[in-house]
Amino acid sequence: MGLLINGEYVDDAVIRQEAAAMRPRYEELVEDLEPIAKEMQLREWSRENVIERTLLRQEAMKDTTPLSQEEIDERLTAMFPPAGDLENCEAGATRAGVDRDAARKDIEAQMRVEKLIRAVGEKAPKPNKKEISEFYKANKERFWIPPMVHASHVVKNVAEGADENEVLEEIKKAEAEIKAGAPFSEVADKYSDCAGQGGSLGWFPAGEMVEEFEAIVFQMKPGQVSDIFRSVFGWHIATVHETKPEGTRALDEVKAQIESELSREKQEKALEDFVDRLRAKADVKTAKKSQ
């Protein structure tokens, strides 16, 4: 038995296809349900998804304003890319079992649905200052950042079987030039096995680099240059440019992020309410396909 949704027949095969698509994620959500109960619930959720999607499309198709033919053609070309002897297919021909004219109609319908969803979202209220502030206070742990260091280094890797002392002598040359006043970045590009960008590692938090490296750089002050030290990779010389202590990012720093998240939630809620209103006044019943 299929569904008759506001007079439009939807075959039961569509609901079965929806259930098949939902099943992997559904199985993760309802592991504890009995098998029969799981199948019944999956069927019901799939049925509701199909109904809501159909109602949205029906509502969207009431808008008859012209669509961008260029965008329709672009999407159609993505579905039917020119290829070999298929380039001269007549309009309406099939490719991979898909009718080109039917595909165009589906694309137009999808574009109208997307347009409707955008319109509903645009009507959603914008987050106000109080909501943003309250969200920040309630979720401060999300905006915590660990200690950060902006550092550069010269590294001479010690490969398996390599002469340790020979590699050490190489990095001592770099150390001597730095102590003689050569810019650290120039020395790094000249001697480092990770040459480029003056040896810069950018900003990184505690826990991202190897322990031996962090044990040195997180104890240094801006402008300081380390002695030569060893890590699992080889010999290093490091310099620290800036440091940031651990702490919670200020509201001003994360305001745009919070506003975006709250806006998305409000838009999703507006769409849910809109679909609920469509569902409340819809005429939905089981039916057999008319011959």
Image (cartoon, rainbow, N blue to C red):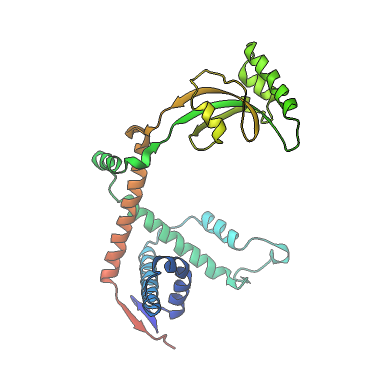
Q: Residue at x 44, y 88 (%)?
A: 291
Residue situated in front as seen by the camera: 78 or 245? 245
Q: Is residue 99 above or below residue 125?
A: below
Q: Quadrant of residue 191?
A: top right
Q: Is residue 33 above or below residue 188?
A: below
Q: Can you give x and y, in whole percent of width and height, for residue 117 in the image?
A: 37, 57
Q: Residue at x 42, y 35 (%)?
A: 146
Q: Can you give x and y, in whole percent of width and height, for residue 207 in the image?
A: 50, 37
Q: Can you give x and y, in whole percent of width and height, for residue 22 in the image?
A: 45, 68
- Is 291 positioned to the left or the right of 59 in the image? right
Residue lying furthest left: 130
Residue situated in front as seen by the camera: 197 or 244? 244
Q: Quadrant of residue 169?
A: top right
- Is 149 positioned to the left or the right of 171 in the image? left
Q: Is residue 259 above or below residue 78?
A: above
Quadrant location of the N terminus in the rendered image:
bottom left
Q: Residue at x 44, y 31 (%)?
A: 147
Q: Quadrant of residue 278?
A: bottom left
